[in-house]
Image (cartoon, rainbow, N blue to C red):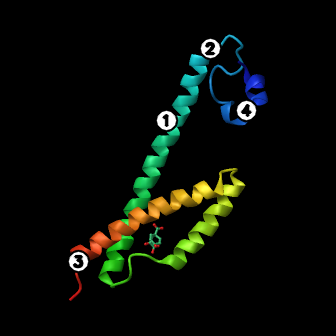
Amino acid sequence: MNSATLYISGYVPLMTAHLPFFDDDNTSSDQILLALRQSVDNIDAALIHMLAERFRHTQAIGKLKAKFSLPPADPKRETQQIARLRRLAQEAHLDPDFAEKFLNFIIREVICHHEAIAAKNPKK
Ligand SMILES: O=C(O)C(=O)C[C@]1(C(=O)O)C=C[C@@H](O)C=C1
């Protein structure tokens, strides 16, 4: 398989231009799979690091909210975030419904963290 074949099969060649093997007709499917999986692994690692950073900041928000007796959830803010992420997803050719589900999944977890922080710091 070469880059032309990948293009015909719907794979965006720009994304693979930096990968080895793609202009070589003798490349085995195992080699191509390995190269693609290396990129997937790099992207997964980046996602984990970005999520860790996001949770670090939302933990700080949770502490602030507990200190000033603010509610753990802010539905108005969530509505804005979802509208924005759906727009970004569309531009990036990612399914907006998936983007919304993904954000909601993360936010639900953040709200649990906020509730736990508030429970540990009860206001008299
Ligand atoms: O921005 C806030 O107020 C947060 O608590 C953070 C966050 C989020 O994870 O983005 C979580 C819960 C809220 O309902 C809205 C947003």
Q: Amino acid at mark 1?
A: Asp
State the SS at label 3.
loop
Q: Amino acid at mark 3?
A: Asn
10 Å crowding of disc 2: few (<14), some (14-19), many (20+): few
Q: Which label's residue is closer to the chain start, 2 or 4?
A: 4
Q: Is mark 4 within 8 Å of ligand 1?
A: no
User: In x, y percent, where is residue 64?
Assistant: 35, 77
Q: CA distance from mark 4 to mark 3?
A: 53 Å
Disc 2: which residue = 28
10 Å crowding of disc 1: few (<14), some (14-19), many (20+): few
10 Å crowding of disc 4: few (<14), some (14-19), many (20+): some
Q: Quadrant of residue 81?
A: bottom right
The residue depicted at 72 percent of the width and 13 percent of the height is: 25
Q: Is residue 27 above or below residue 43?
A: above
Q: Quadrant of residue 1?
A: top right
Q: Which label's residue is closer to the chain start, 4 or 1?
A: 4
Q: Amino acid at mark 4?
A: Pro
Disc 3: which residue = 121
The residue depicted at 23 percent of the width and 77 percent of the height is: 121
* CB-based contact (under 8 Å), mark 3 and mark 1: no
The residue depicted at 65 percent of the width and 30 percent of the height is: 18
Q: Is residue 92 left or right of residue 109?
A: right
User: In x, y percent, where is residue 55?
Assistant: 39, 60
Q: Which label's residue is closer to the chain start, 1 or 2?
A: 2
Disc 4: which residue = 13
